Amino acid sequence: MCSRGSRAIAASLLFLTAAGCGRTKTTVGLSPVASLDGTLAPPTLVARLRRAGGGHFHATTSLRVDLATQAAPGDGSKPASPTAITTTTDLWMDKAGNFRLSESNDQDGGRDIVRAGGEIAVALRYGKRVRRPAQDSESNRILAEALGAPWSAWELVRRQVEVEGAGPAGLHLRLGARLVELPAGFPASQGLRAWRDTVVLKRLEGRVNLDAAGRLPLAFACQASFQATRDGLPVAGEIAVSATLAEVGQVADVAMPEAEPLRLRQRTVLEERALLGGLPAAALAPAKKSSP
């Protein structure tokens, strides 16, 4: 889960139009649920955090999904993939938009990414940090993944959520009485994530605290248990997300740490000879032009 649902995150770009692409836009008349649809969409959150001058985002995400065939394999073997995983994320973004992402999970995975100026340095857990030129498109993708913890819970509970309260005083998430159709443009889950569209909640509780302008989630907490169907099999699971956004506009400048430059491997003449050494000389000789 170091990389959280890049397809769904890319699809959630649809919300940028409705949310004003990070530009100031009134939300008067929107229901609390519709307002959170835009506020929690990762691309919108990235744009708004940049406009606010950055901040420190911290999140813990725990997801457990039990397939019927994994609950009792029969032969005593472990499932091919873990049924539960907990990921901890810290993102620091400064006023210039430079950032550092530190992410780890309880399956011994993790990554550390620093973007400063025109360069980006990446290190997987226990690996060396490598520096190379950065691309704006990859920075947006990385940031959307880093800020995606609240969205990972919201997309599961959205059909049955009931939001109580209004404004920055705090919104409470409760289990609604019935399933609600998703609004037009809501990013559908696809591929390995398609089972999310079959979720039926059994328990839900949570809270969202927004900033004074109602544009940034300063605190998000959600716990839910659910049932679903995956590949025709019943699924039961739980999700718990806790996230905070602090130091808005106050994060110190992010600097590039020590890192090795990315070395582009170039095949030398000696390597070519070693690789082709087993071929007969006639095969290596250049073809002669025939006389007219």
Image: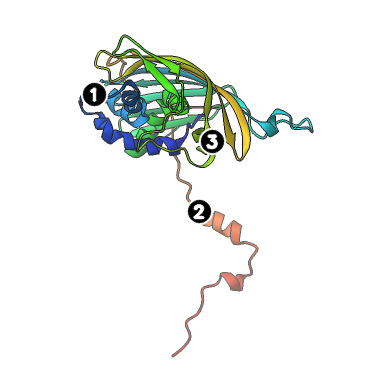
Which of labels 1 and 3 is toward the front? 1
| Residue reaching furthest to the right | 75
- Where is residue 180, by image quadrant? top left
Residue 185: percent from left, percent from top? 35, 38
Q: Which residue is mark 3?
A: 195
Front one among 277 and 221: 221
Please name the residue shown 58% across and 35% down the image: 229
Secondary element type, mark 2: loop
Secondary element type, mark 1: loop
Please name the residue shown 27% across and 33% down the image: 18
Q: Earlier in the sequence, mark 1 or mark 3?
A: 1
Q: Earlier in the sequence, mark 3 or mark 2?
A: 3
Q: Which residue is mark 1?
A: 29
Please name the residue shown 43% across and 38% down the image: 188
Q: In the image, 114: left or right of 197? A: left
Q: Is residue 92 above or below residue 140?
A: above
- Where is residue 121, by image quadrant? top left
Residue 190: percent from left, percent from top? 48, 41
* Distance (Cα) linking label 1 and label 2: 66 Å
Q: Which mark is residue 268?
A: 2
